[in-house]
Image (cartoon, coloured by chain):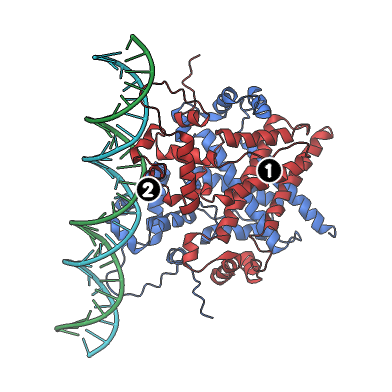
Chain colours: A blue, B red, C cyan, D green
Amino acid sequence: MADGRSLPPVLQRMWGREPAPRRGPRPRLDLTMITAAAVEIADADGLAGVSMSSVAGRVGVATTALYRYVASKDDLLTSMADGVVPAPPDPAGLPWRDYLAVWTRAQRDIVLDHPWLLAVTRFAPPLGPRRLLWLDRALTALDGTGLDDGEKINVASSLTGYALTDAALTHTLASGSPELVDSGIEGATAYGEVLAEVLDPETYPALSAAMRSGVMGGAEGWTDADDFRFGLDLLLDGIEQLIARRASGR
Amino acid sequence: MADGRSLPPVLQRMWGREPAPRRGPRPRLDLTMITAAAVEIADADGLAGVSMSSVAGRVGVATTALYRYVASKDDLLTSMADGVVPAPPDPAGLPWRDYLAVWTRAQRDIVLDHPWLLAVTRFAPPLGPRRLLWLDRALTALDGTGLDDGEKINVASSLTGYALTDAALTHTLASGSPELVDSGIEGATAYGEVLAEVLDPETYPALSAAMRSGVMGGAEGWTDADDFRFGLDLLLDGIEQLIARRASGR
DNA sequence: ACTTACTGTGTATGACGTTCATAGTTTCAA
DNA sequence: TTGAAACTATGAACGTCATACACAGTAAGT
């Protein structure tokens, strides 16, 4: 059954499938080097600093040489999104809940270390080797919980989603989006104060009350790691409940 | 206390704060018209179709005229991200759990109706009038649950995050990312089959087993609305548990 | 009537992604 | 050993786009 279905070229390269029929000069680069260079630039100057020419400059080739390894800039971004991901923590013997807590927090930290991921991630189902390794470990950790494969995947992806959105929130409130920083709105406290000022109590009764009472102020504000824990426990509690349900018959 | 802290110009316009000191010709446009035009283009042709010149063309002015209303394209995107959001459902009398379920699903549907939102949303804390209205309604729905304001906000933002990530997953698996569609990978089933083929069982034991067992196939696959319900209930169960804890003393 | 403040236009610029023809390089076959 | 074939990196060129700026036109204030 010859379905035309196979991985796009970039992904083939990401999976180390470069057949490389040998003739002509040896390639001076490979996707890994290019990706690493791009990641370094993004870490240093943000995603805006990543252009085909800046990446090419860093690896020491002409701009257009990159197109031998990558079909488009978009492909490069795809590769970067998988390339920054380190190896997942080892589930070795940890109870599922403990492991998933570590696992989720680690994902959040990756994003915080490389904020540009937020702009790159299409929140698409993972197809790269490194991201999929994370998924695999989550499934492993859920072995013996009585959940079926579909449920396990759902659980993992819910947690990943939480890690991403929390990282996004934390990042923009801490480092601030350029837009807000320009206006002097930095940090959760300022955010709350501005809102308190702008919101009309008639149309936003609950919210304006909350803001005026200063929820966003203080040391344990919105950005805090405790807040991550809070939402995470919400999810984990839900999962635990599901597992308990599965264990007790229905 | 003259803090330099005030809303950026776009946001002021989004909040209807256009002082408009009157002199010279009457403006032929306003931010709302421009935003609406941009949204129409994005809905029809995707975000790639939205350029300053295409938007200008649609409202019938020269490209650079837009800069009288918007400081940058980025500002326009910000405005679009709030502009597409309709009014939130009415909490009137619904129990918090029912309302938040509706509320969250509605947010998911917005994103699915305007997939380009995924590329625009920086998952930043909301600052636009429409998004904040949603937040307000969630807080209202949580009145009388015993949660404090900070917790309510956390709950709401967790749910919003879930709606977004689920929408992203659903969208890319259903409509497919251009990258994947080009390679004939469409829908969850194809996704699963490709993975099953690519994954090495040694390095991805749990995941390759799951894929080979065909989790992704069938009518109730990953994309299904039931899967949304699944993750949502995970969260709501967690929230309910929290509320119960607060109600019973500690 | 004259100034003033503001609006829309046209031109220009610089950055960027991408295409293409070309020159150079290594391997394979004869 | 020679020549073709396959492949690499390059440089020039193109089209698109966001944006800056100077200018002409227009309504209100004096």
Quadrant location of the C terminus of chain A in the rendered image? bottom right
Q: Amino acid at mark 1?
A: Trp
Q: Amino acid at mark 2?
A: Val
Above or below: residue B148 compared with residue B189: above
**Residue B218 occupies quadrant:** bottom right
In this view, the residue in front, B153 or D13, is D13
* Residue sitting at x 46%, y 56%: A78
Q: Secondary structure at mark 2?
A: loop
Q: Position of residue A5 (x, y in %)?
A: 51, 72
Q: Say few, some or many: other residues with alpha carbon within 10 Å of mark 2 (under 14 / 14 to 19 / 20 or more).
A: many
Above or below: residue B126 compared with residue C3: below
Q: Which mark is residue A115?
A: none
Q: Mark 2 — on which chain does it sit? A: A
Q: Position of residue A31 (x, y in %)?
A: 39, 61
**CA gap, disc 2 to disc 1?**
38 Å
- Establish whether labels 2 and 1 are both on one chain: no
Q: Position of residue A92 (x, y in %)?
A: 66, 57
Query: Which residue bears the numbered disc 1?
Result: B103
Q: Position of residue A189 (x, y in %)?
A: 57, 26
Query: Which residue bears the numbered disc 2?
Result: A50
C25 sits left or right of A239 in the view: left
Disc 2 vs disc 1: which is toward the camera?
A: 1
In this view, the residue in front, B20 or A11, is B20
D25 sits left or right of A121 in the view: left
In this view, the residue in front, B48 or A95, is B48
